[in-house]
Image (spheres, grey):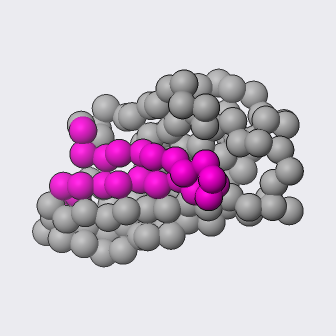
Amino acid sequence: QVQVVEAGGASVQVGGSLRLSCTISGHTHSTYSMAWFRQAPGKEREAVAGTYTDGSGTYYAGFVEGRFTISLDNAKSTLYLQMNNLQPSDTAKYYCAAALDEGSVDAGLATARSFNYWGQGTQVTVSS
């Protein structure tokens, strides 16, 4: 059974930093891409950043503005999101998503339907 587990969410002050991690396990097929999405209360889920696991491309949402960095440790099947200069607008639950070679259709790194496995989310709260 495939499991996607996020960690690293916390409450921080404005301007602070956090590093989220996401580990996928239990899969027999290779991962094709992985991404971070977020959802704030009362808002739609939105893509934050994503990457193809072969290194062929990455995506960052416009609001990231150079503050976040996505990285992947293929050996550990772990995805990271380094978030710097956090703002109250970054407050949300952050979800990790993974697309395996089997059963996924690539519609782009910013599109939720590209990913067939999701974690339960980790909460990030930024206060002033």
Of 95 and 4, nearer the camera is 4
- The answer to whether residue 111 shows anywhere in this view is no
Q: Is residue 6 above or below residue 52?
A: below
Name the residue rendered at 72%, 50% in the picture.
117
| Residue 127 percent across, percent down from the top left | 20, 70
Q: Is residue 71 magenta?
A: yes
**Residue segment shown in magenta:** 66-88
| Residue 42 percent across, percent down from the top left | 44, 55
Position of 20 with respect to 72 (left or right) is: left
| Residue 80 percent across, percent down from the top left | 46, 55
Position of 25 with respect to 42 (left or right) is: right
Q: Is residue 41 above or below residue 108?
A: below
Q: Is residue 29 magenta?
A: no
Of 124 and 1, nearer the camera is 1
Of 43 and 66, nearer the camera is 66
Q: Quadrant of residue 26?
A: bottom right
Q: Residue furthest bottom?
A: 11
Q: Residue furthest front?
A: 75
Name the residue rendered at 41%, 53% in the picture.
81
Q: Quadrant of residue 31?
A: top right
Q: Is residue 55 above or below residue 91?
A: above
- The answer to whether residue 8 shows anywhere in this view is yes
Q: Quadrant of the N terminus?
A: bottom right
